[in-house]
Image (tube, grey):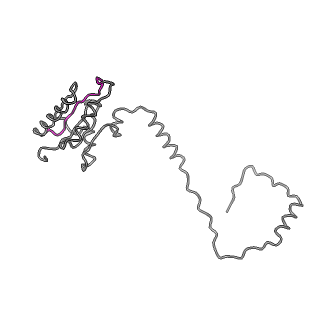
Amino acid sequence: MKTATKWPPRPAAPVEADDLRLFHDAVADARPLPPSGRIQRQPPPPPPIPRQTFADERAALRESLAGPLSIEDRLDAGDEPNYLRPGLPRPVLRDLRRGRWIIEAEVDLHGATRDQARLYLAEFLADCLRHDRRCVRVIHGRGHGSPGKVGLLKLLVRGWLMQRTEVLAYCQTRPQDGGEGALLVLLRGRRSA
């Protein structure tokens, strides 16, 4: 096995006669070990360190943390509120999120009290089932008019929708359809009722 050569080479330090004599006295009765018949293997070298991969990952992480997220980035990342009924395939939610369904009806719950909003939503969903409307928009608002600017109606509507058996999936609408102030809801068909 070769050893690494250092550059520039250093001259060997002179060995004193007394040191050499002491060394020879210390190893005078040493004998070589008998051959064992075994092969002495060198341990495998450590795996290479992918420094460039680590650097690229750190740069991507820094970039993703530094840059502001647009609503499209949040929607694609699944950062928005969404629901998918258990047992349905994920592409159903993805297609709903990407706007592949045509919005057939909408209800606006702005200004309604909690009880009024729940009643309006129940009547609206029943009417949509009767007329076989599958994709609807529920506008709940962003909560700017609420005390403390907390969108209470927004949270309530999500919970109510998850409790309804006719709701297959919902997601936040795209910016042009209402953004954070509305949900896109996919309902089951009349024939599957």
Q: Residue at x 78, y 74 (%)?
A: 31
Percent of width and height locating residue 60: 46, 40
Q: Is residue 52 above or below residue 114?
A: below
Q: Between residue 107 and residue 9, name the one nearer to us.
A: 107
State the image quarter where residue 166 is shown: top left
Outermost residue toward the front in this view: 115
Percent of width and height locating residue 95: 25, 42
Q: Is residue 79 above or below residue 1?
A: above
Residue range (magenta) = 133-146
Q: Main secondary structure of the magenta part?
A: loop
Outermost residue toward the left in this view: 130
Q: Residue at x 22, y 26 (%)?
A: 110
Percent of width and height locating residue 183: 25, 34
Percent of width and height locating residue 71: 34, 32
Q: Residue at x 86, y 60 (%)?
A: 19
State the image quarter where residue 149 is shown: top left
Q: Is residue 38 above or below residue 95?
A: below
Q: Is residue 144 within the magenta segment?
A: yes
Q: Between residue 174 and residue 119, name the one nearer to us.
A: 119
Q: Is residue 164 above or below residue 45?
A: above
Outermost residue toward the right in this view: 17
Tell how many labels: 0
Q: Residue at x 55, y 56 (%)?
A: 47
State the image quarter where residue 174 is shown: top left
In the visual, does 127 lie left or right of 65? left
Q: Quadrant of the N terminus?
A: bottom right
Q: Between residue 114 and residue 15, name the one nearer to us.
A: 114
Q: Is residue 49 within the magenta segment?
A: no
